[in-house]
Image (cartoon, rainbow, N blue to C red):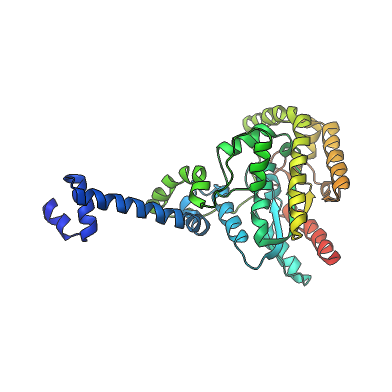
Amino acid sequence: MKSSSTFIADLPESFSAFTAGLIKPSLTAIMTAVVAFVFSGLWFLQSAEDLVAGYPQLLASGPGDDYAFITAAALNVADTKPSRRGVAVLGASCLRAATDEVKIESELQNADISERVFNLTTRGQSLWESIAIADYIVPGFGGVLLIDTNPLRFARGLSTLETIMRNQRVGFRSPILVELALDANIPATPATGYYAWDNRIYLRARLNKVFKNLLLGPVEHEHSRLSETIDKEKRNWVIERITEDIKSYDEDVEVLLDALSKLSTALSRSDSATIILIEPPINPNFIDTVIGRDFYARHMNRIRQYARSTNIRFWEMNEELAFGKSNFADWCHLNNTHSRDEYSQLLTDNLIREFLRE
């Protein structure tokens, strides 16, 4: 077996000097170490965005880490030149469980509409994050932005925005979100143009995952979106959480609609993308027993009023589909492919009419 000194001597000269500097510091070794550190930092600053966009399976904490994979998808869409047309679906897991982007894209192609469909939904995606994703991708995207109007998303206002700015879940910066935060006196730093620095919160939370995934193998995104019926204990926890969340609805809804208007105004300047609000599936039994018919009717009326006043279309889906309690695993997640196909087909029919209008 070679001695440590023989082993070091066999290494390339620069690395040998670096290692020697750790064992017996010298000016040369220290300078080499500093240069190596600086160049490593510069390489990371240059390559971080490529790593995030190209290798989400190395950054993901597990198969259900939607944000690593959606970040990669958004970075790639935004970087497309010329601008890529299509349909982007933005929202939380209730909408994701109901949306089959492969089926929708295939049906559009059957109707001679060659539009890509990008499913950018995630578990627990707030309306703030939907706005951020839409804002970020638009330079490389033109077409339709379908935005989820689940009432809970309109009950998570400025406190949620503050949490998002502090604990970044998507690996890119939205100028609109920064502006909204600063307007609300929430600390936020405008982008500098250096990806690794601007997204240091996102990267810092994930760098340790790279080493783990290199050792254990890359993570594959969990594509299954249908849910199984939840047990009584989890159901009670969900009901308790939702009941608490909707208490802030009246305070938060106007703040969030104003934020949506800022996005709409910015998009109208570029004339490349169109917002369409869509009603996600929701269990009618949950409406009756937890949030109440009056609350849901009030929410729907507010979204209708907003849509009329801003000339943004609002697609109401549930009345036509008439899903019942048996179609759901819980309060909003569909539990079978037939129901998902029904929802996706209605969405497709609406999209075909939308594209034929142009």
Q: Count numbered badges in the picture.
A: 0
At which x and y percent is residue 17?
20, 54
Residue at the image position 40 percent from the left and 56 percent from the top: 43
The one nearer the camera, 58 or 317, is 58
The one nearer the camera, 243 or 256, is 256
For the N terminus, which image quadrant? bottom left
The answer to whether residue 3 is above or below residue 125 is: below
For the C terminus, which image quadrant? bottom right
Query: Residue extending furthest bottom?
Result: 112
Q: Quadrant of residue 355?
A: bottom right
The answer to whether residue 167 is above or below residue 213 is: above
Residue at the image position 86 percent from the left and 44 percent from the top: 304
Q: Is residue 125 visible?
A: no
Residue at the image position 76 percent from the left and 56 percent from the top: 269
Q: Is residue 146 visible?
A: yes
Q: Quadrant of residue 332?
A: top right
At which x and y percent is residue 333?
69, 44
At which x and y percent is residue 128?
67, 42
At which x and y percent is residue 49?
50, 55
- Relative placement, left or right, of 165 versus 327 is left
- Relative placement, left or right, of 243 versus 165 is right
